[in-house]
Amino acid sequence: MQQSLSGARSVARLLGGGSRRLSDLLFRGFTMLLVLFVIVIIAAVVWVLVSNSMPTIQQFGLSFLTNQAFDPVHDVYGVGPAIFGTLVTSAFAIIFAVPIGVGTAIFLVDFCPRALRAPLAFIVELLAAVPSVIYGLFGFLVLAPWLQSTGEPWLQKYLGFLPFFQGQFHGLSLFSAGVILVIMVLPLITSVSREVILTTPSAQREALLALGATRWEVIRHAVLPYARIGITGGVILALGRALGETMAVTMVVGNQTSPIGPGLFNTGYTLASVIANQFNEATPGLFFSAVIEAGLLVFIITLLTNIIARILIYRMGHRVGGLTT
Amino acid sequence: MSILVQEQQPAANPFQAPRTAHNARRRVSNIAIVVLSLLATAFAVAVLLYLLLYVLRAGLPYINIDLFTKIPTPNGEPGGGIGNAIQGSLILVGLASLFGIPLGLFTGIYLAEFGGRGAFATGVRFLVDVLTGVPTIIFGLIAWVYIVVPQQSFSGLAGGVALGIIMIPIVARTSEEVLRLVPKELREASLALGATESRTILRVVIPAASSGIITGIVLAMARVAGETAPLLMTAFGNPFFNSDITQPMESLPHTIFTFAESPYQAQINQSFAGALVLIVLILLTSFAIRWATGGFKQRGR
């Protein structure tokens, strides 16, 4: 578009149309001003997080990342259990959401009756439109009580030899948070995978079909190798979402520190839920700074995952711009 | 590839694959994948339907006029409503739109019309994309530090600013995409008629893309209407009607959150009723957008 405008402009100049008008300069200037303002906002985000974290960074250094206690009484702060909880719940979510999400995408592109494709894809995308607090409400009042009374005992009975499923049933647990996150990141993985799978050149599919391949073999040998990078980007995008999810996780994760161990039925904390729970009591000084540093950590982690994901998706040469959720 | 090296007797029907153990395995694995992917889709659809039906069943009996017009009763007595939250949500989304739409729209205009593929525009585009992935509670922290802490009070203004920042990338990227879809002949025609660049953009390009831009704006408004985390530390909450944006303000998602964890059954019921109101609003918006953009029509492969 840029070329088209400047091209037409140079033609205008050749015809003696003169240089840029004042109104154009004003319009450009105004646009630039607002863009710069957006950049200033982003810079302010970084500045607030970094400058307000300095007290705890200077006081505790790297031990902030491993310290078990978040203890305002003794003014000692650490987010070890929160980092652990964030990683465990997000890993759980990704492990289960990737096969389901990619499977759904494959079904929607390849196997689904043509008439049902668009409606089903829309329904899956609706999962992303449901606000986080409603997942939290559902998780807190329906899913967690059910897991405590039925789901977790059942898992322990049959899979109790695995260290993940040992221990007491709390309902509000890392496990509940993981299950809610599976549902929340599912639509993201599905829609990115679906968009990417749709871009596979049909010549590739037809070539394999002509060789007598079954539809699964077409997916296995033509579609997935082509879509791999884009799907990976979508998965990392989903990971970033899971790592930073606040409301739903805060409502079901228990918000109590348990000893770090493999047990998924333990209550836990995540970095984002530390912020949501603690900012209210935060007194100026180290406490305030510790809450902000938890925010800084969430910011850095999600920033890195997003940058990696965007690079992968850009490399697919396919922009998933509408996917803002 | 193994499927090419088959030394079998010619079958009676040359279009029928020979019935060998190898082909049987291929057929079985093909069916297995169809079934597994069907199950995955069924899971996603079932989860959504169960969630919607559950909220409908738990919330519908408590939808009444009082819910929309009254404020909560003290101590969770039955009756009362969440009118303060609905009023607060409307004000907050309005404030967020005042702040977020101009910034988002002009960023979109810059990216589509002026930036092109230059390094600066690529950088801005990348920043805006990355902004969408940042957890929204971070924007709440920013508004908290810059507005709530100096003012020494939670306020609707802080909430509106936090939500507005969340709107920026959504509006910017959708506007950019639809502005790029406007045919260049339209611009050239306008410029050839002697219109200036700014006039071309404001009077020709933006009107041509207006339905797409509005879609992006509505999408962004629906998105922030359901946000809770950034409001915890900005608008906070308020058990009374309040239209003063310098004071704490209730919002629908915040009411759902606090009532869900309430010890009183009456408030839990109202939490579901509020969730039903919110979810219906958001689903209606999604349907309207999909209908307006023609998304229900066939999108072929």
Image (cartoon, helix red, strand yellow):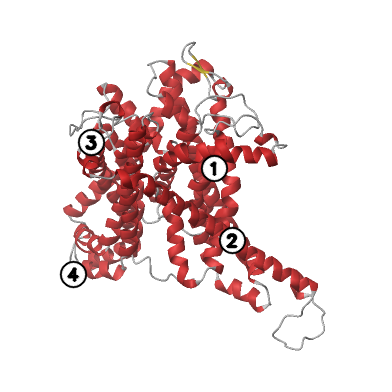
Q: Which residue is mark 4?
A: B193
Q: Are marks 3 and 2 on the same chain?
A: yes
Give the residue type that dot 1 points to: Val
Choose between A16 and B103: the one closer to the eye. Answer: B103
Which marked residue is nearer to the observer: mark 2 or mark 4? 2
Q: Residues within 10 Å of mark 2 (few under 14, many from 20)?
A: many
Q: CA distance from mark 3 to mark 2?
A: 45 Å
**Chain containing the residue with disc 3:** B
Residue B284 locus on image (x, y percent): 31, 55
Q: CA distance from mark 2 to mark 4?
A: 56 Å
Choose between A229 and A156: the one closer to the eye. Answer: A156
The residue drawn where x is 57% and y is 20% is: A67
The residue drawn where x is 27% and y is 37% is: B160
**Secondary structure category for the residue under label 3:** helix
Quadrant in the picture for residue A288 = top left
Q: Is residue B203 above or below residue A93?
A: below
Q: Which residue is mark 1?
A: A179
Give the residue type that dot 4 points to: Leu
Q: Which residue is mark 3?
A: B84
Q: Are marks 3 and 1 in contact (CB under 8 Å)?
A: no
The residue drawn where x is 58% and y is 40% is: A150
Q: Which residue is mark 2?
A: B37
Going from N to C along the chain, the mark reached first, 3 or 4, is 3
Q: Residues within 10 Å of mark 4 (few under 14, many from 20)?
A: few
Q: CA distance from mark 1 to mark 4?
A: 60 Å
